[in-house]
Amino acid sequence: MGHPATQEAAALLDQAERVVVFTGAGMSAESGVPTFRDALTGLWQRFDAQALATPEAFRADPALVWGWYEWRRHAVQQAQPNAGHRAVAAIEARVPNTVLVTQNVDDLHERAGSANPVHLHGSLFAPRCSACAHPASTPYGEADEPTDGPVPPPRCARCAADIRPGVVWFGEALPTAALEAAVEAASSCDLLVTVGTSGLVYPAAEIPQVAARLGATVIQVNPEETPLDRVATVNLRGPAARVLPALVEAAWGDTDQVPDESPGDA
Ligand code: BJW
Ligand code: ZN
């Protein structure tokens, strides 16, 4: 027997036929990946994440911005999916119409067994040319050392312009296919579970609102209040790695339908 709100959310999950799971940086917090607004630790502390994640910042100082993303890519590669990522994969395994929409640029959902997350804000693992968009390979040298400071970006093999991270910066359009898939899923789901997002960054923050407006139930998982509280039917206040497995357990009992990543597979 869990908390009453967990029981209520579990009943909603068990009844749902079309589920959207919508995730943000808090999803990966317990894997040791800092949230976006906490992303600047160590040497990076004196910078402002919101100011670094822009095309203007990259144009002004490509090595600073590329170095920051290389450092974050390394951190993600060292991290492991947590029990929350595995619970999301368990929901997908249990409810076949589930669509996973993530704002995260890490690959922890994939590594927890989610086959096809919709990445609204791109990926740390899909660099491309800043001029001609030609995809570049990643990582640059498998055994590269973690960076901690500016690193000049590599050059495009086709046109020699700077390679840039394959993420969506402030002021840039989201990838059309991903945004369309997310809106379509949110428009046709009966339950949306929003996890670990501040709900501050648009247009992604519209996704739970679209679902709610069209009649879906919204469950929110977040230790803090957010602007999405008012569209949520149930607010589960707590960390994703604890709340999501408890939710899946309360709905269906077995949380271990999806195998863990094999040890030493970092
Ligand atoms: C836990 C937890 C645990 C902690 N368990 N939870 C005014 C109104 C509307 C829009 C705008 C506006 N002014 C400007 C805009 C536009 C702008 C925007 O929204 N700005 C806002 C800041 C106001 N948006 C854009 O610019 C977007 N593009 C756009 O609008 O284009 C228009 C256009 C159209 C056509 C042509 C051209 C242009 C693009 C937005 C791109 C966002 N990109 C980033 C960076 C990606 C790369 C990178 O990572 O460096 O995406 S920003 C950053 O925010 C990142 C995230 O995906 C995104 C969302 O953050 P998220 O995931 O919510 O994380 P946090 O850190 O904010 O919150 C963490 C949460 O977790 C907290 O709530 C914690 O409590 C919780 N938590 N521990 C569960 N254990
Ligand atoms: Zn190029």
Image (cartoon, helix red, strand yellow):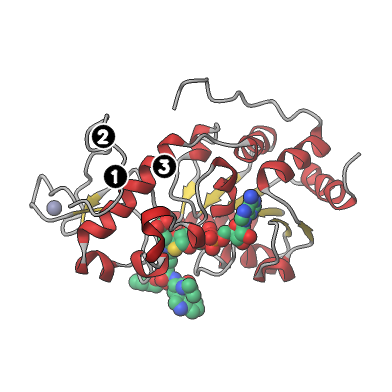
**Disc 1 on helix, strand or loop?**
loop
Disc 2 and disc 3 in contact, CB within 8 angstroms: no
How many neighbours does mark 3 have within 10 angstroms: few (below 14), some (14-19), or many (20 or more)? Answer: some
Image point 39% across, 52% down: which residue? Answer: 122
Image point 37% across, 58% down: which residue? Answer: 44
The label on residue 75 is 3
Q: Is residue 47 visible?
A: yes
Label 1 – label 2 distance at C-alpha: 9 Å
Query: What is the total number of numbered labels drawn onto the structure image?
Result: 3
Q: Position of residue 53 (x, y in %)?
A: 36, 64
Q: Position of residue 19 (x, y in %)?
A: 67, 48
Q: Position of residue 105 (x, y in %)?
A: 43, 50
Q: Is residue 176 visible?
A: no
The label on residue 147 is 1
Disc 1 and disc 2 in contact, CB within 8 angstroms: yes
Answer left or right for 240 relative to 39: right
| Residue type (three-letter) at the residue carrying disc 1 | Thr
- Residue reaching furthest to the left: 159
Earlier-in-chain disc, 2 versus 3? 3
The label on residue 250 is none
Label 1 – label 3 distance at C-alpha: 10 Å
**Disc 2 on helix, strand or loop?**
loop
Earlier-in-chain disc, 1 versus 3? 3
**Disc 3 on helix, strand or loop?**
helix
Q: Position of residue 87 (x, y in %)?
A: 66, 37
Answer left or right for 81 relative to 163: right
Disc 1 and disc 3 in contact, CB within 8 angstroms: no
Residue at image mark 2: 144
Label 2 – label 3 distance at C-alpha: 12 Å
Image point 26% across, 30% down: which residue? Answer: 142
How many neighbours does mark 2 have within 10 angstroms: few (below 14), some (14-19), or many (20 or more)? Answer: few
| Residue type (three-letter) at the residue carrying disc 2 | Asp
